[in-house]
Amino acid sequence: MSLREKSYALMPRLVQWRRHLHQYPELSFHEVKTQRYLIEQLSEMGLQPRVIGTTGVVVDIGTGPRGVAVRADIDALPLQEEAESVFKSRCDGVMHACGHDGHTAILLGVAAVLAPQEATLPGRVRLMFQPAEEKLPGGAKLLIEEGVLDDVDRVLGLHLASDLPTGRVGIVVGPATANADRFHIEVQGVGGHGSQPESSVDPIVVAAHLVLALQTIVSRNMSPRHAAVLTVGTLTSGSNFNIIAPRAEMTGTVRTFDEQDRQTIRQRMQELVTQLSSAHRAQGVLTYSEGYPRVVNTPLEADAAERVIGRILGPDAVDHPDPLMAGEDFSYYLEKRPGVFLSLGCRNPAVGAMYPHHHPAFTLDEEALPIGVSVLATTALEFLTLNDR
Ligand code: NI
């Protein structure tokens, strides 16, 4: 049987793993039951899983000087699930709404198809079940600090993609996800009676000016050839209709693909927040936090993945989507080792899989699971036999 056939034969177990994980979702760095379940399942396959990164699991299959690391993120989101199903989340307010249950099941599948042929593998396949992708500073950094990339030459990962039909795989050469930063702005005014603006400094008016001014950064200070986003996600102030509030607060996110753009936006935000506020006699303070850096896929590995995927799924299965503005901590692995991060199509309106990630009704087409297993297992083996650059 080929790896592809073995992956499809695993379908009932893949569904069982995914649905179990879906029913017991856990938040970032709290993946305790998930970790126990993974250790149990991997041990049953005759493997020797180890704990890593507090709530993560790592396991090696095969030996030798060459190594490839394959990653699945295992955490869920603080969200109440909306869709009804027999495997609906049993944890109130927590849900696998990003498809990490699918990623985890797929990586268990990779273990299941590779474990029986451990003795004949051309090197070491290291499976990384990583905690806390959804929450900064993320689990990837921690795993790297604990040495997960020692003796590893290349890295491989995927994310299910709700905008790509099942059966298709997206490959981007170069930057594939954005630098994902966040900011907090505080505007300090002077509170008072709503009828006496002359003795107050109204922070709501200043905040309103700021929201509009911030929108000019991308449109007026950036090259139109470069993609960037600045979104004000929250704006809070005030307690009653006849009170001038003392303070207003905003939070938001900045997404860029280019380091220079990132710094330009940060600099312009700083200028606008402090100077526009002071022009209105208020005080503005910007706190800017850099989040996950961009994912950059390396050409040699992206080409190798495309070859393999074309071979097992047919050349039409490969898609070259635009880079995503989303953030992803797989970037930290790619800063250290060459590799590729793929998009795995899981969209199928016939089974309700048409909602975007992080939506309370998000679900994935389970037919994507065996495809993910064959793609990861075959690409991992291909990476082990790639010539050194
Ligand atoms: Ni995700």
Image (cartoon, grey):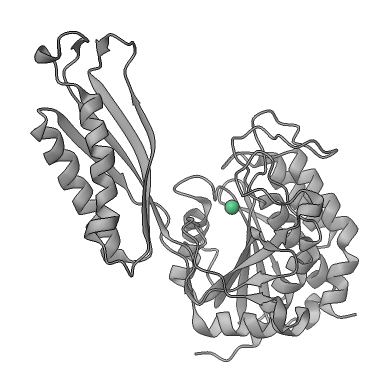
What is the tally of numbered marks visible in this picture?
0
- The residue that appears at 87% across and 56% down in the rendered structure is 13
Check the image and report above or below for 350 versus 84: below
Q: Quadrant of residue 276?
A: top left
Check the image and report above or below for 22 versus 78: below
Residue 366 point in image, percent of width and height: 80, 56
Quadrant position of the N terminus in the picture: bottom right
Side (left or right) of 235 relative to 381: left
Q: Quadrant of residue 57?
A: bottom right
Which one is nearer the viewer's eye here, 222 or 54? 222
Q: Quadrant of residue 8?
A: bottom right
- The residue that appears at 87% across and 72% down in the rendered structure is 6
Side (left or right) of 269 relative to 241: left
Residue reaching furthest to the front: 195
Residue 281 point in image, percent of width and height: 9, 28
Residue 368 point in image, percent of width and height: 76, 62
Which one is nearer the viewer's eye here, 282 or 132? 282
Residue 313 point in image, percent of width and height: 76, 78
Res 171 seen here: yes
Check the image and report above or below for 245 versus 67: above
Which one is nearer the viewer's eye here, 66 or 180? 180
Res 152 seen here: no
- The residue that appears at 64% across and 42% down in the rendered structure is 31
Check the image and report above or below for 226 versus 196: below
- The residue that appears at 60% across and 70% down in the rendered structure is 156
